[in-house]
Amino acid sequence: MNAAELLVRCLENEGVQLVFGLPGEETLELMDAFLDSRIRFIETRHEQGAAFMADVYGRLSGKAGVCLSTLGPGATNLLTGVVDAFLDRAPLVAISGQASLNRRHKESHQYIDVISMFKPATKWNTSIPKAEVIPEAIRKAFKIAQTEKPGSTHVELPEDVAEEQVGDAGELKPLFVQGPVTPEPSQAQVARAIQAIAGAQHPVILAGNGVIRGHAHEAVRTFARQLQIPVLHTFMAKGVLPDSDPLSLYTIGLQARDYAAVVMEQADAVIAVGYDFVEYAPCFWNARRNKRLVHIDVSPAEVDEHYIVEVGVLGDIRLSLEDIAEGLAPFDSRWAQGARKTVTDGFDAELGGKESWPLRPQHVMRDLRTVLRPDDLVLCDVGAHKLWMARMFPCEVPNSCIISNGFAAMGIAVPGAIAAKLLFGERRVVAVTGDGGFLMNSQELETAVRLGLPLVILVWRDDGYGVIRWKQQVRFGRTSSVDFGNPDLVRYAQSFGAAGYRVTEPAELRPILVNALNGKVPAVIDCPVDYAENLRLTERLKALPH
């Protein structure tokens, strides 16, 4: 057995089933070792796509997704997806090949200091100097990646180390896998939290992605319903409370003053549960620093002048909420009812009006939601469509609409949808993307076709970078370098062996979605979108009363 085979055994020991990546000369030993393992290697068309797949796999499963590249350009191509996992708190282990130890002290073909490059983008990373450290290094990489707050780690394996012979038995074997136990909350802090919340007149719950990671959404639902406290979600916490529930206020996260922000302005106490600053900074919702803040999470709050916590309850989120609820009486339901009405009246006004062409974003979302089941998976790329999807697309199930909002990297939707379909083959998967984000990783359409994954890619086409165009129009009244051309997306999809559809009038979108979802091959839908609605939204939100 050589070192590469030992590393693969350690991956098997961690329960790894899939590794996403590209082969390279410096990973020859690893690639050969995968052939004799239980692990399935998913060959992608770009290392960034591989990292995004591992990123989404980790976020959906709670177990570290694994991506692999060779040295130099392979490693640099991984970096964007690795950073996305780091800031979106998704467990990920990146493995990269490297030049032999005997040529790293000098100028050498394709050699760069990958460890230094990955250091600010990971929770921990290391280079393997000899085979005997592999069991400890791999165990540590997975333990750190999966421990709250989860994120990315990185292990580098030089090609000469990969070839080292370690024998078939002996002490070099995978280590026992164990994870940390989340502590119970302090009863003294629970008592302080009860006192702080009880004094409020207009409390709200701000649910963050930590609720989903901690499998605490049922506890939040029970807590909110028992006490009649409305719930605002970050973009990454959609579905913690079903949006059909009268206590759901959908999401908060738009930097403009949205309907949810109006409710937050009226709140005097915020119960932040599993909330992370990278999701939506406190300065946007506590600008006056006048709200009573109760922080409920497994780790202490970050320091921020707009987030001075009155009480912090640290430990298992589910236990914390149960203990706090026992000491509180329900609040006057009229506050929650009024808050809900503020949000839904605004959305109803936006959804009203006749069908137009190109389609308005609200109508695209409505038709998509109509044809999907509650537990179907939507992978949302970054762009103007993300802001519409994040604020208005109704969700009933946690982790059913994946949005990158920590790093907010364009190009995540198509590779993310592939990972989602590999993980949950029985669920229907839709990648919602703009034409800008789609063409950043559209080469992975070949990966989906090769793997036989019947997923749907809904492209909101506006022939430009919609968010930047929107912001330029608002700030300067004109645009700069945001317009581009597109290939024929239908023929482009067909050239890969996928199905291609084009929406040419409003009534076509819904039946096209149904046909694509029932298909046996990946499908791309070219749907023109009227982003003039962005400026109309800006004007509507400016008119909201203070």
Image (tube, rainbow, N blue to C red):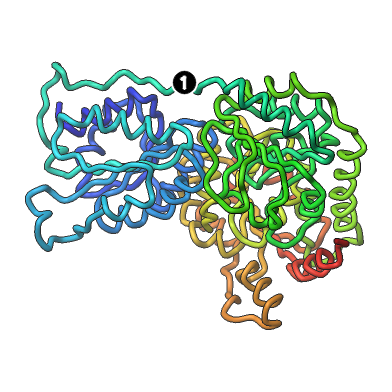
Q: Amino acid at mark 1?
A: Val
Check disc 1 and report the residue beneath it. 181
Nearer-the-camera pick, 457 or 473: 473
Q: Count the marks.
A: 1
The correct choice, above or below, for 20 with respect to 313 in the image is: below
Where residue 258 sits, quadrant-wise, is bottom right
Indicate the secondary structure of the residue bearing disc 1: loop
Where residue 394 sits, quadrant-wise, is top right
Nearer-the-camera pick, 70 or 294: 294
Within 10 Å of disc 1 (Cα), the crowding (few <14, some 14-19, many 20+) is few
Is the N terminus in the top left, top right, bottom left or bottom right quadrant? top left
Where in the figure is residue 425, as x and y percent of width and height? 56, 32
Where in the figure is residue 173, as x and y percent of width and height? 21, 21
Where in the figure is residue 16, as x and y percent of width and height? 38, 29
Residue 404 in sight here: no
Q: Residue 145 vs residue 424: left or right?
A: left
Where in the figure is residue 91, as x and y percent of width and height? 45, 37
Residue at x-position 60% and y-position 67%: 488
Is the C terminus in the top left, top right, bottom left or bottom right quadrant? bottom right
Q: Residue 453 vs residue 528: left or right?
A: left
The correct choice, above or below, for 139 with respect to 112 in the image is: above
Residue 382 in sight here: yes
Nearer-the-camera pick, 246 or 270: 270
The correct choice, above or below, for 292 with respect to 261 in the image is: above
Nearer-the-camera pick, 65 or 313: 313
Residue at x-position 76% and y-position 63%: 504
Q: Residue 279 vs residue 422: left or right?
A: right
